[in-house]
Amino acid sequence: MAGRERKQTDLDKGIVIPDDWPGYPLDLFNSPEHYCEDLECVYIPHGVIMDRTERLARNIMDDLGDHDIVVLCVLKGGYQFCADLVDCIKVLCRHSNKTLPMRVDFIRLKSYLNDQSTQDLHIEGAENLSVLSGKVKIFSAYLNELGIICLLGAL
């Protein structure tokens, strides 16, 4: 990786939420009324997600230096996370002496046929993924079954 190397710390492992943690009570947050019957608690407040996204953007800037990167956003659920991450990287570029040339592409992953899960993973919108060859790739995705947003990794 270009730039200075970061030391792995406990903070780089993320925030760990124990399986038996009850979450934050709903009365601590403003929730749209139409969600209230469906929600029991808030596990990760929006501000924490945004802080971790900003930290992730800073780590990407530190690790990748001035490399060209391709951000590959997995639609549809990964769009907002991807947009937030790209925005954070752009803000960091504006306020530093580094540039991080970036291109954003979109794909859709399907593992269902009708309403049945299959063992096959189909990639749509990947007609010309050869442009990714030799580039640093960052993938963002939304794991629908778990209902969480994650970054799959910089490869």
Image (cartoon, rainbow, N blue to C red):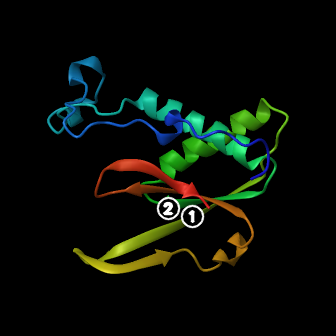
As drawn, 48 above or below 75? above
Q: Is residue 109 or residue 34 the one in the foreground?
A: 109
Pointers 2 and 1 in contact (C-beta within 8 Å)? yes
**In the image, 67: left or right of 90?**
right
Give the mark nearest the N terminus, 2 or 1.
2
Q: Is residue 124 or residue 93 the one in the foreground?
A: 93
Residue at the spot 22% in from the left edge and 74% down from the top edge: 115
Query: In the picture, residue 22 is in which quadrant?
Result: top left
Residue at the spot 45% in from the left edge and 50% down from the top edge: 150
- Tell me where residue 95 appears, x and y as whole percent: 78, 29
**In the image, 60: left or right of 33?**
right
As helix, strand or loop, the secondary structure at mark 1 comes to strand
Query: How dense is the environment of label 2, judged by Cα within 10 Å: few (below 14), some, or many (20 and up)?
Result: many
Amino acid at circle 1: Phe
As drawn, 97 above or below 69? above
- Tell me where residue 114 appears, x and y as whole percent: 25, 78
As helix, strand or loop, the secondary structure at mark 2 comes to strand
Amino acid at circle 2: Val
Query: How dense is the environment of label 1, judged by Cα within 10 Å: few (below 14), some, or many (20 and up)?
Result: some
- Tell me where residue 94 appears, x and y as whole percent: 78, 33
Query: In the picture, residue 112 is in which quadrant?
Result: bottom left
Mark 2 → mark 1, Cα distance in angstroms: 6 Å
- Tell me where residue 26 appears, x and y as whole percent: 22, 24
Total labels: the figure holds 2
Q: Quadrant of the C terminus?
A: bottom right
Q: Which residue is mark 2?
A: 74
**Residue 31 disc label:** none
Residue at the spot 63% in from the left edge and 45% down from the top edge: 86
Q: Which residue is mark 1?
A: 106
